[in-house]
Image: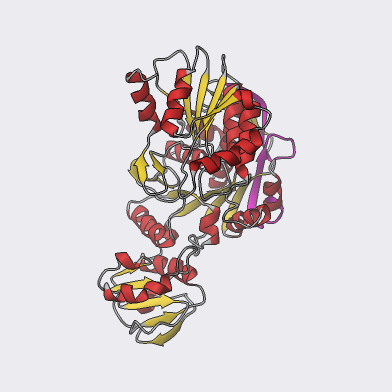
Amino acid sequence: MLLREIVNNIKHELVRGSLDIEISGISYDSRKVKKGDLFVAIKGFTTDGHKYIESAVQNGAVAVIGQEDSGFCENYIKVKDSREALAQASLNFYQNPQKKLKLIGVTGTNGKTTTTHLIKSILEFNGYKCGLIGTNHNMIGSRELPAEHTTPESLDLAKLLYEMANENVEYVIMEVSSHSLAQKRVHGLYFFVAAFTNLTQDHLDFHASMEEYRDTKAKLFSMCEASTINIDDEAGKYIFDNTSSKKISYGIHENAMLCAKDIRLRERGVIFELSYNNEKETIRVNIPGLFSVYNALCAIGVCLSVGLSLSDIQKGLVIAKSVKGRAEVVPTNTPYTVIIDYAHTPDGLENIINTVRGFAKGRVITLFGCGGDRDRGKRPKMGKIAAELSDYVVVTSDNPRTENPSDIIKDILEGMKGYEKKFTVVENRREAIKYALSIGKEGDVIILAGKGHETYQILKDRTIDFDERQIVKEILEGNQI
């Protein structure tokens, strides 16, 4: 494709060279540049891509887009915002696949992954071919593809959308993270429906405040035709009041347009009566917890915006399965139950403990840690929640990254003062799991919180294999307890 076509719709200045050169690919990583590529230099949070322009040219880049002039390339295009330029250039290069697809974007702190899977289940039951982009994996129909980020970088996203369009996907259900909105990974996309789940403390290592975090999420609702928003959430109310899209509110209170009543929480799922526009429908979801009611309401609102009936929506919901790492029961031949959950925020941890508390016949034992190089402010809050709501807590490591695990644990313990008899600290996560299993008794439920679907642990100097399902199996089969 000609460079001229790639920079179409991008405000730019041709510093030198020509736009009539052939481009064979695009890259934002100088190490991955191939001969004939266009290199886009991005100013990142840890490094500046402009430092690697010379390296990109040496690797074969024939043109460069950047925010600062560089003398290393014959064909240099200057733009105001290279992240924005990368997003639009990528869509142009991949023939604007978004125009052939109906995009559904789900944002919020918790519930995105499960909600997108519920939407996919409903739409597929009703005959639509779907793509999925999210935390656990990406999917084209039933085919799974690996996922590195909740929302891919704009170039990778454009390529994925291109593949989906070529495979006749009709709807793409996408988790849209606050990072992706702030970093303009979804710039140039327009969403058929956008949905908001909730806003609780997270990512304050990236966002300066909760207000900034909320306002970043809110950007999605200026990029959509219709929206479905949780107005039981204060940030949701704000977003609902400030979007001009066709909107549906949802919640468990009377003022919501889509309202859940007569909620019955069960060990294996939830049942509730749904009220919408004088219509009523009994809704069943085979995933436990009050949060499942909210996730279901969100999915229902999205699918109503698509044009499905409540009856057809319920048929797709009732066959939906729980998502890996979300209230996932691990098969064990033990008198106690082991559940893996991705809860890594105060709200997420509170939700899973309360859910388990609703059906546990014995004690609720919670094992958790907090990630390193991330929001420190949530650590004592999570410690307090775990100590108050659990019968016993095992405090351990999560993904410490470059931080010392013991320092992270110290932050957690600040919120657990006064509960010293209710917890123990085992820094090594494998040993912590072994300990938790060793104290399990009949009727107890052991929650392994924080890692969920992840099959690795990120340490200071390396990433190791760490699939908690396999670890539980090895400990129990090896009689290591």
Depicted 154 relative to depicted 405: above or below? below
x, y (%) of residue 170? 42, 50
Asked if the stretch drawn in magenta spans residue 241, the answer is: yes
Res. 308 in view: no
User: Where on the picture, by quarter, is residue 16?
Assistant: bottom left
Horizontal placement of 291 versus 69: left or right?
right
Res. 337 in view: yes
Q: Nearer the viewer, residue 420 or 35?
A: 420
Which image quadrant: the C terminus? top left
Q: Nearer the viewer, residue 373 or 174?
A: 373
x, y (%) of residue 48? 45, 69
x, y (%) of residue 3? 35, 77
- What residue lies at 47% left-to-right and 65% top-to-bottom? 44
Which image quadrant: the N terminus? bottom left
Depicted 122 relative to depicted 281: above or below? below
- What residue lies at 47% left-to-right and 75% top-to-bottom? 10
x, y (%) of residue 75? 35, 83
Depicted 235 relative to depicted 57: above or below? above
Q: Nearer the viewer, residue 143 or 481?
A: 481
Horizontal placement of 366 versus 240: left or right?
left
What segment is highlighted magenta in the picture?
240-266
Depicted 324 relative to depicted 404: above or below? above
Residue lying furthest left: 35
